[in-house]
Image (cartoon, rainbow, N blue to C red):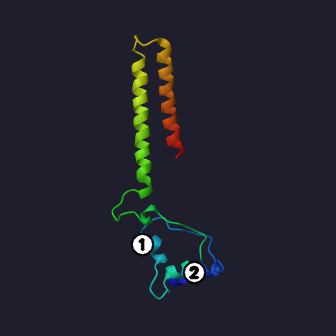
Amino acid sequence: MRLIANRIKDDCDGKLDAIVATHRHKDHISGFATNASGTGYGDIIRKLEPDIIVQPWTEHPEAPVDANVAPSLKSFHAHQKRLKDMETFAASIYSELKSFDRIPLDLRKRLQFLCIQVQTLAWDTCCQM
């Protein structure tokens, strides 16, 4: 590994643009190991001062060891669920409005339009994230 780290250092003239660590498997991250004396493979790479480091979500400082989703995604998933609930509710109202004869036709059409807008908003918002 030391040979590889030094070869990278030589090949990039002492400066890295980026490092990408895809996941925690030992064969993917073992080259980033550091030690107290600053001579580990990771220390050699660190001294190349990469402009960007891309790490998997498992390296998030707030992620518990047994996490199965990134901490930043918890709120995203909650938001997605709320949007899906909104969409389901709007779809059920839209479906029911067709059978409500007592509601004036113009009001039914406006309500159906609003339901379609809610469903579209929920879909568009989900797709843009």
> Can residue 113 be seen in this snapshot?
yes
* Label 2: which secondary element: loop
Write down the quadrant of residue 102 in the picture. top left
Label 2 sits on residue: 47
Q: Name the amino acid, label 2.
A: Lys
**Residue positioned 63% across, 80% down in the render:** 14
| Residue positioned 49% across, 86% down in the render | 38
Determine whether 70 is above or below 111 in the image.
Answer: below
User: In front here: 125 or 45?
Assistant: 125
Q: Mark 1 or 2 closer to N-term?
A: 1
Give the x, y percent position of residue 18: 59, 69
Where does residue 96 sit, x and y in percent of width and height?
39, 20
Q: Nearer the viewer, residue 79 or 65?
A: 79
- The residue lying furthest to the left in this view is 66
Residue 70 visible in the shown view: no
Report the residue marked by disc 1: 26
